[in-house]
Amino acid sequence: MSDIGRLRAARESVLLWFAPAKVQEEGTTPDYRFSLANERTFLAWIRTALALIGGGFAVDQFLTDLSHWARASLAVALLAAGVACTLRAVNHWVRCERAMRLGTNLPVSRFPAVLAVVVAVLSVAMVAVVLFGWAG
Amino acid sequence: MAPPPGLPPVETDRDPGLQPERTRLAWRRTTLTCLVTAVLAMRQALRSGSSGPAVAAVGLAALAFLAFLLLAHVRIQRLGAARPPAMPVRTAAAVAVCMVALAVFGTAVVW
């Protein structure tokens, strides 16, 4: 897909957030069990986002030996990851619901892989910062 | 047999009765996680300083949690129906607003 096509698709899915009735106009209503499963997946992503946000608070409150900058950067990175996770959760839920109504394939996403890499990098950074904090 | 293309797949051999129950429990778990995060946020606000702004910050974190609690409550009521309707997009957006409020609040306090 070209960049313009991708931008247009992103714009359309964000517009869908603000036009709830439009989602229900398209296609046919799927078996309610599939909608509920989609809702539970959405909630699982929200819990992941909450854990990241809570982790941001925890870094600021419990790694008190670190310098202000190291602590604030780690905390803000975790909070930002939490926000990204939340926004993506809503977007993915809408797209899945739409795909089920239209009978098309469920959307694939590279977000889980990206999130895994981000969490791994943050963990390594945190371990390094804490170890250097003890050494120095 | 595979379902014909263009139609939503149909499951026949699973107990449909537990699906709303599982979804209800998922909302409960998420509310509990939200409570833990909100308590951490409030602890942060209380630690970070003097009375005026700290009280306002604690109030805001509590408000974000209460908003989520209300959303979960309304949704759980809806799930009690025989054929529960799909979650409205408005609910999903409101949940996102609660999360973003907590995170923005956190960034403001951390900074």
Image: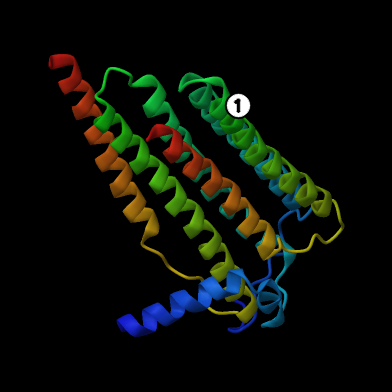
Identified at 42% across, 40% down, the residue is: B107
- Mark 1 neighbour density, 10 Å: few (under 14) some (14–19) many (20 or more): some
Quadrant housing residue B9: bottom right
Residue A107 to residue B90: above or below: below
Q: Position of residue A42 (x, y in %)?
A: 57, 54
The quadrant of the image that shows the N terminus of chain A is bottom left
Say which element carries label 1: helix
B60 left or right of A80?
A: right
Q: Position of residue A64 (x, y in %)?
A: 33, 19
Residue placed most toward the observer, A10 or B83: A10
Q: How many marks?
A: 1
Quadrant housing residue B24: top right
Q: Residue furthest right?
A: B82
Write down the residue under mark 1. Answer: B55
Residue placed most toward the observer, A112 or B9: A112
B97 left or right of A6?
A: right
Identified at 52% across, 64% down, the residue is: A91
Q: Position of residue B86 (x, y in %)?
A: 72, 63
Identified at 23% across, 27% down, the residue is: A127
Q: Position of residue B106 (x, y in %)?
A: 46, 37
Residue B20 makes an appearance in the image: yes
- What's the residue type where badge 1 is placed? Val
B5 left or right of A25?
A: left
